Image (spheres, rainbow, N blue to C red):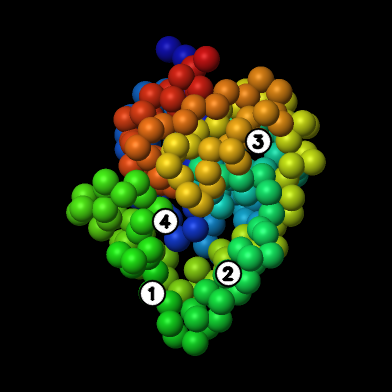
Amino acid sequence: MQPKAPLILISGLLCDEALWAHQVKSLKNIADCHVADTTRHDRIELVARDVLAMAPPRFALAGLSMGGYVAFEILRQAPQRVLRLCLLDTTARPDTAEQKERRKLLLAMARTGKFRGVTPRLLPMLIYPDRLRDAPLTETVMGMAERMGPEVFQRQQMAILHRVDSRPTLGAIACPTQVIGGMQDTLTPPDLLREIANGISGARLDLIERCGHLAPLERPDEVGALMARWLTA
């Protein structure tokens, strides 16, 4: 029997293991999955260092949104250790000036006790509109944010705010790469995913219809199938 591939999964802002629950289950026969801890540091470089410290010598790597920023940094720090790369609903670009100001406002609110996690008002930014009445999905998203809490939120937002531009290093990524995203993702829309796929030699792009920013939760079967193909190709 072929040994299972070590697979490190890196979650997005205010997301925990629940983001990947379906993929961990569906890939269990071909991958030894581990969800990385992204809660301890306020710099992407330090988060990446922690992931590398706990990871096996060589591994497959998947990251969503902020997890993608960490994945890019891991490729800069230790490219020889990454066997395969899967990027979901993310961008290689740094924040725009407008995005930076929005993050600073949210940080100020959290520091003054006004952290509200993911509320029903924010859900339309994260998931496809037709899923807003899907209670198990929305409760999962809000529950992750509640478990993460305001202190983790501040550290993660600071890390995202200070991330570097990953576009100049896309061409150096040499491992088999899969890019996945929601066709209706408004936070990291398809054009940003195409930019990543076009910048990495041989990368494959798959966009999922009727899906927003949290593809592993919104379309778990489709994401699981794409990741299985990526791992076994």
Q: Residue at position x 62%, y 49% from top?
A: 70
Q: Amino acid at mark 4?
A: Met
In the picture, measured across the screen, residue 228 lies left or right of residue 130, that is right
Percent x, y for residue 186? 48, 49
Give the CA separation, mark 2 to mark 4.
15 Å
Q: Residues within 10 Å of mark 1 (few under 14, many from 20)?
A: some
Residue at which label 3 appears: 195
Q: Quadrant of residue 60?
A: top right
Specify the amino acid type for callout 2.
Arg
Q: Is residue 57 left or right of residue 32?
A: right
Q: Residue furthest bottom?
A: 112
Asked if one can make out residue 74 in the rendered structure from this viewpoint, the answer is no
Q: Secondary structure at mark 3?
A: helix
Q: Residues within 10 Å of mark 4 (few under 14, many from 20)?
A: some
Q: Amino acid at mark 1?
A: Arg
Is 12 in front, or is 138? 138
- The residue pinned by badge 2 equals 103
Label 2 with label 3: CB-CB less than 8 Å? no
Residue 125 shows which numbered tag?
4
- Which of labels 3 and 1 is toward the front? 3
Real-space Cα separation, disc 3 to disc 1, in angstroms: 33 Å
Give the residue displayed 49% in from the left and 27% down from the top.
Answer: 206
* Label placed on residue 24: none
Between the residue at mark 1 and the residue at mark 4, the CA separation in whole angstroms equals 15 Å
Q: Secondary structure at mark 2?
A: helix
Looking at marks 2 and 3 on the same chain, the residue that comes earlier in the sequence is marked by 2
At x 60% / y 33%, what residue is drawn? 194
Between marks 1 and 2, how big is the CA–CA gap?
A: 14 Å
Q: Which mark is residue 116?
A: 1
Residue 88 in the image: state x and y as whole percent.
51, 39
Say whether residue 105 is left or right of residue 2.
right
